[in-house]
Image (cartoon, helix red, strand yellow):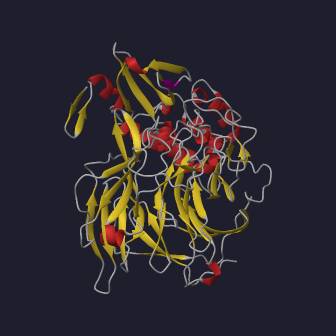
Amino acid sequence: MQDLPGRIVLSAAILAVLFPVFAHGEEAQAILAKYRAAALEAGDATRGKMVFESQQAACKKCHSIGGKERLAGPDLAVIGDKYARDQLIQAVLEPSVHIHPDYASRVVITNNGKTFVGVLQRRTESELQLLDAEGKRLRIPLAEIAEQQASKQSLMPTELYKAVKVDAFADLIAYLSILKQQEGDAHPGMPSEIAELANPIRLEPLHSEPMRFDHPVCIIAKPGARNQFLVVEQQTRKIWLLEKSPQGDRKELFADLSSESISGEFEGVMCLAFHPNFLENRKYYLNYHVREEGVFSPVIVERRATKDLARDAVGASRRLLRIRQPTDLHWGGMLAFGPDGYLYIGAGDGGPQEDPDGNGQNLNSFLGKILRIDVNHRSEGKPYAIPDSNPFKNGASNVLPEIWAYGLRMPWRFSWDSATGDLWVGNIGQELFEEVLIARSGENHGWNVYEGFMPFSEQYRRNSEKYVPPVLSYRRKYGVSVTGGYVYRGRRSPSYVGCYIFSDFESKRIWALTQKDGKLVKIRQIGVCPEKPASFGVDSEGELLIVGYQGTIYRLVLDDSVFE
């Protein structure tokens, strides 16, 4: 493999696996269409279970249903909650069209020319561990690896129709569609049903259609200006200035980070935060991804705007922190300044699935944490200082002083209640539950000992530890990827004041909840976002915005709705 400026040239062996040739001619497409039609209209779930367990379908090689054994593919116990029938059909017939990053396979070629393909289970200091399509664990010493790369091809067979007849396929889909989460034990913070408002909120586009964005993930009001916002595009790694005025909308490029950050389906620039004294020092901060020395890492950097604050001043960023990860998964992605003036950083557990190394509970790792640093000073040879009030600043030598809270899996978005100072976190779950929590200094929020309110693993449990439960945990029938929001403190909608408003990226549902002493009081579904909601924002008047990942920023119009 040879590195060239701006690109990588891979060997023919690895290219053959990374980019397989799909020779679906007209005849194959006609067969696929026949299978889709049959599965949409018919199917017997009882027979479908036998298909699932058959040697012909070979589903059990990679998938379990509520089992404890880790296989190459995801457990399917609640797959009927996660996917609609048409999505299940595509996932089985054309598994390589969309591969979830948690289960993407890797291609590894060793120095002696051997090729291994499997889903990453673990990476240690000495070896890579993969699970292949047969469920076998492959151990490959790092010293023997010549090349490795994520594959574009699923481990699932791409031509299942050759092994399973059309009626049997319809039965299989019928069976998968009934695999849904059981209600289980009732818990006040995990309601079985979430009522919908009779009069839901409205969502109005913030901008005109020609000003759509490319995979936006963050919007933040520009300090010192009314109706001006910065919008972060994940994949293009560009930041745009959006201005609203009676004369019309204006959209101008503020910054381009493509020379510093990598890009991909899920990689790129994740978040932006203005320094509390931005109007004087012109500093702002970014969370984006790099790959250095073969290791994927979120990094936190400092940049400056021009003297007129109209755009980025250009030049290299000042790097503050690099968070090395064993995989490309669960990277957190958030950063924001708290009411105390310190910079808070959300770091995910780093993967692989189920946090096998216990990063969330390891106080000698940045992973699975909320970190807090002082960007105005430097100490101990670091480009930042540790606030004196950080809970572990004067702790044991093997405890990182940057840690403010821990036991998190994927803290995607967090924000402070401007009235109470509570830090609300949307924490993405594993297989069964999403959660919303209030984080406080030094608290352990349980992952991977707990997922939501439910026990998950005993491996890293400490009997003396206090695990703080979330305010809310919701089941898969409501969504699979929580998007943290804000406590509403605007003036237009009195009934919503004090409500935490948040959403789910996949189901697009928008909820509002209230709590007392960290316990859920009331929750309602208040609307549905037209696009997948990647993030929330708040304007200069305290009114809420929501970022649609397909390109549109919306205003949440709460005026005509009542939280009841």
The kind of secondary structure the magenta stretch mainly shows is strand
Q: In the image shown, does 75 or 407 lie closer to the viewer?
A: 407
Q: Residue furthest left?
A: 5
Q: Residue furthest right?
A: 185
Q: Position of residue 471 (x, y in %)?
A: 69, 59
Residue bounds of the magenta highlight: 128-133
Q: Can residue 43 be seen at all in this image of the molecule? A: no
Relative placement, left or right, of 242 versus 545 is left
Residue at (47, 25) in percent of width and height:
125
Q: Position of residue 141 (x, y in %)?
A: 44, 18
Relative placement, left or right, of 461 versus 508 is right
Q: In the image shown, does 216 or 17 lie closer to the viewer?
A: 216
Q: In the image shown, does 277 or 563 lie closer to the viewer?
A: 277
Q: Residue furthest top?
A: 112
Q: Is residue 148 above or below residue 393?
A: above
Q: Is residue 289 magenta?
A: no
Q: In the image shown, does 140 or 379 lie closer to the viewer?
A: 379
- Displayed quadrant of residue 67: top right
Q: Is residue 131 magenta?
A: yes
Q: Can residue 250 be seen at all in this image of the molecule? A: yes
Q: Position of residue 291 (x, y in %)?
A: 35, 39
- Displayed quadrant of residue 515: bottom right
Relative placement, left or right, of 540 versus 436 is left
Q: Position of residue 422 (x, y in %)?
A: 61, 65
Residue at (54, 80) in percent of width and height:
490
Q: Is residue 331 above or below residue 376?
A: above
